[in-house]
Amino acid sequence: MGPAPRRLAATTLGAHHASDAREEAASVYAFLQLKAQLQAMGAPQALLHRCSAAAQDEVRHTRLMAALARAEGASVRPVEDPGVPRAQPQDTAAFNAMTGCVAESFSALLAAWQAEHASDPELQSVYAQIAIDELEHAQPSWDIHAWLMTVVDHPAQVEAALQAALSDLPELGLPSGQEMDALSRAFVRGVWSTLAA
């Protein structure tokens, strides 16, 4: 059972949590799609298992954020299963680079920041757990990236997609302008130094 509702009307905070819950729910399907596409390509079983584990984590995250949303009087619109679209290895590799290597890695960093700076101890606890899980998701994304780069026809295009995703991060300006700008730029520098090593 989630926390007791504190307000009758949905708050701005509740709407934010509801949005986060939908994003987490969408991530469930994203990991399941990735697993199916990798399986069709003959990816190692270990990578498929890590996709399944990540999807299960995202289910838990969805429930956590939905409970926080309901406690603020907000409801969470369900996310429909989009199915598994047919995709070429090139497209799967670009998707993983952008959403796995960049978005998941940065989500871990953002959740860790929120765990430290949130004023509500319950929020701190939720974001701390999400940060740990997102960090665990990021490493498989990089391992999947390494495997995909051995099977795609145009690895330079995949690297370009990754670079574009990294370039977008400093423009987000979250959670507050200067702080998030510095955080995102440090993340981008860290990724590029790792890739150059």
Image (cartoon, rainbow, N blue to C red):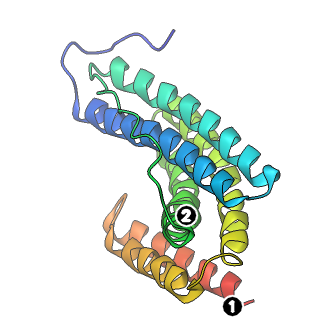
Pick the residue in front: 78 or 125: 78
| In the image: residue 3, left or right of residue 147 | left
Q: Earlier in the sequence, mark 1 or mark 2?
A: 2
Across and down, in percent, residue 3 comes to 46, 14
Q: Are marks 1 and 2 in contact (CB under 8 Å)?
A: no
Pick the residue in front: 35 or 167: 35
Q: Is residue 18 visible?
A: yes
Question: In 3D space, how far apart are the residues under numbered discs 1 and 2 (Cα atoms)?
Answer: 19 Å
- Residue under pointer 2: 96
Quadrant housing the C terminus: bottom right
**Relative to 81, does residue 153 appear above or below in the rendering?**
below
- Residue under pointer 1: 196
Seen as rendered, the residue at the extreme left is: 9
Q: In the structure shown, which secondary structural element does the residue marked by tag 1 occupy?
A: helix
Pick the residue in front: 76 or 38: 38
Res 164 label: none
Identify the residue at image location x=28%, y=22%. Answer: 75
Across and down, in percent, residue 59 comes to 55, 31
Binning the other alpha carbons within 10 Å of mark 2 as few (below 14), some (14 to 19) or many (20 upward) gives: many
Q: In the structure shown, which secondary structural element does the residue marked by tag 2 occupy?
A: helix
Pick the residue in front: 162 or 168: 162
Q: Is residue 119 visible?
A: no
Question: As shown in the figure, which amino acid type bears the numbered disc 2?
Answer: Asn
Across and down, in percent, residue 4 comes to 41, 10
